[in-house]
Image (spheres, grey):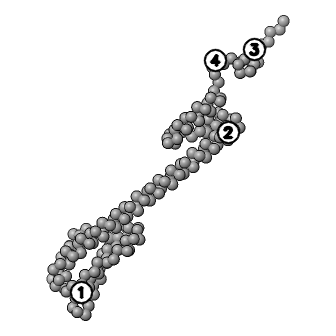
């Protein structure tokens, strides 16, 4: 006796395990329970999907079993695949959010160090501790402004004379008369 049962199951192209329970009841009908379970789907909501239950005679099942199960099992398979895809995307979004929070925290810590150095009047050190635009492109304007303000505090004016700064040039010999 040749059957094509497994070839027909394979043709359904379902994702997951097919759990099939067969039971003959007292009135000559078969009760067939079919449940599709996708092990790759991490969403426990898939367990809420009830099994597909058919109650027919052997002759009726031979004639229409695959027509009766094809669409519901394909929908269940598609749903479990979508659920898993959704969970993966959700996890990626969560990781991206955590990375963004971590990056913001690192930026804040670096700027706090800059503030502390600036309060100590260590402007050049503070300037060097300002984060780079390449590391924090979303704060580019803030970084550039901060560097500009710090550089104004330590950058000498090439055209400034010693008198205007209040400094004397002690390197020149004093004229003795």
Q: Is residue 121 above or below residue 42?
A: above
**Disc number lying in front (4 or 3):** 4
| Mark earlier in primary sequence (2, 4) | 2
The numbered dot on residue 172 is 3
Q: Quadrant of residue 14?
A: bottom left
Q: Position of residue 56 (x, y in %)?
A: 21, 85
Q: What's the CA distance linking mark 1 and mark 2?
A: 82 Å
Q: Between 10 and 103, which is closer to the camera in this rendering? A: 103
- Determine whether label 1 and label 2 are within 8 Å by CB: no
Instruction: Single out the residue that lies furthest toward the top.
Output: 177
Q: Residue at x 61, y 39 (%)?
A: 129
Closer to the camera in the image, 68 or 38: 68
Instruction: List x then y, in percent, for residue 98.
Output: 51, 54
Residue under numbered circle 2: 117
What whole-number distance in Å separates the C-alpha atoms at marks 3 and 2?
34 Å
Q: CA distance from mark 1 to mark 3?
A: 114 Å
Residue at 41% x, 67% y is: 42
- Residue in view at x 30 percent, y 70 percent: 76
Residue placed under numbered mark 4 in the picture: 159
Residue 10: tell me if it is visible: no
The residue at which mark 1 appears reads as 30
Q: Secondary structure at mark 3?
A: loop
Earlier-in-chain disc, 1 versus 2:
1
Q: Residue at x 61, y 36 (%)?
A: 128
Mark whose residue sits in front, 1 or 3: 1
Disc 4: CA contacts within 10 A as few (<14), some (14-19) or many (>=20): few
């Amino acid at each position: 006796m040749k059957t094509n049962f497994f070839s027909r199951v394979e043709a359904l192209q379902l994702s997951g395990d097919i759990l099939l329970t067969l039971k003959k009841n007292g009135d000559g009908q078969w009760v067939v329970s079919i449940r599709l379970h996708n092990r790759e789907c991490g969403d426990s909501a898939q367990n809420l999907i009830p099994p597909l239950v058919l109650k027919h005679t052997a002759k009726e099942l031979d004639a229409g079993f695959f027509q009766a199960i094809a669409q519901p099992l394909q929908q269940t398979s598609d749903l479990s695949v979508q659920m898993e895809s959704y969970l993966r995307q959700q996890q990626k979004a969560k990781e991206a959010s955590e990375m963004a929070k971590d990056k913001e925290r690192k930026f804040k810590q670096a700027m706090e160090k800059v503030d502390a150095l600036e309060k100590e009047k260590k402007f050049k050190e503070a300037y060097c501790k300002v984060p780079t635009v390449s590391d924090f492109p979303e704060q580019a304007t803030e970084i550039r402004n901060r560097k500009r303000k710090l550089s104004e505090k330590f950058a000498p004016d090439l055209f400034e004379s010693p008198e205007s700064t209040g400094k004397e040039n002690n390197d020149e010999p004093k004229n003795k008369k």
